[in-house]
Image (tube, grey):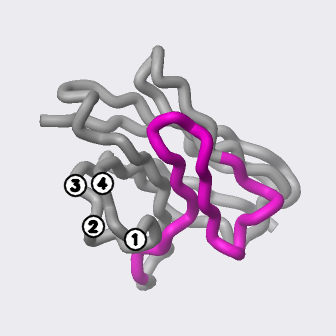
Amino acid sequence: QVQLVESGGGLVQAGGSLRLSCAASGRTFSRPLMGWFRQAPGKERLFVAAINLSGTITSYADSVKGRFTIPRDNAKNEVYLQMNSLTAEDTAVYYCAGGAPRTWSVYGQYDYWGQGTQVTVSS
C-alpha cells in the first residue's frame, strides 16, 4: 500500500507563487510515475503535470506550461509542484497521484491518490 500526503496549498494573490509537496510512504517501488491533477468546483479532475521515476521526463498540461514545474526528490520520497504566475483559473483542489499509467494525463490510470490540497488564487 502507498500513502500520499499533499501540503502547501493556500490563498495567494494573482501573479504569486506556491509550492505544493507530496510525501509518499509505503511500497515506494510501486509508484514509478508521479503526477498532479486539479479539480475546480463542479468540474472534472484535470491533468496538470507528471514526472517519471528518474526525473528525466516530464509532461505538462498546455494551461500550465512555462509556469509550473514538477521536480521530485526520490531520496525524500517527495514530489513537488512549483506554481508561478498564478491566475484565478488555477484555483482548485490539487491532488497528487502515483502509479504506472499508460497515458499520463488520464487520472483513471493512476493507482494511488492523496487527499488533496486547496489552492485559491485571488484576482
Q: Residue at x 87, y 56 (%)?
A: 15
Residue type at mark 3 is Asp
Q: Which residue is mark 3?
A: 111
Query: Quarter-wise, where is residue 106 in the image?
Result: bottom left
Residue 100, numbered circle: 4
- Callout 3: SS: loop
Dot 2, crowdedness within 10 Å: few (<14), some or many (≥20)? some
Disc 4 and disc 1: Cα gap in Å? Answer: 9 Å
| Sequence-first disc among 4 and 2 | 4
Q: Secondary structure at mark 1?
A: loop
At label 4, counting other C-alpha atoms closer than 10 Å, the crowd grade (few under 14, some 14-19, many 20 or more) is some
**Farthest residue toward the top?**
75
**Looking at the image, residue 80 lies above or below residue 27:** below
Check contact, mark 1 vs mark 2: CB within 8 A.
yes
Circle 3/circle 1 CB separation < 8 Å: no
The one nearer the camera, 34 or 94, is 34
Magenta-colored span: 44-69
Marks 3 and 4: CB-CB under 8 Å?
Answer: yes
The residue where tag 1 is placed is 103
Q: CA distance from mark 3 to mark 4?
A: 8 Å
Q: Which residue is mark 2?
A: 109
Q: Nearer the viewer, mark 3 or mark 1?
A: 1
At numbered mark 2, what does the secondary structure look like: helix, strand or loop? helix
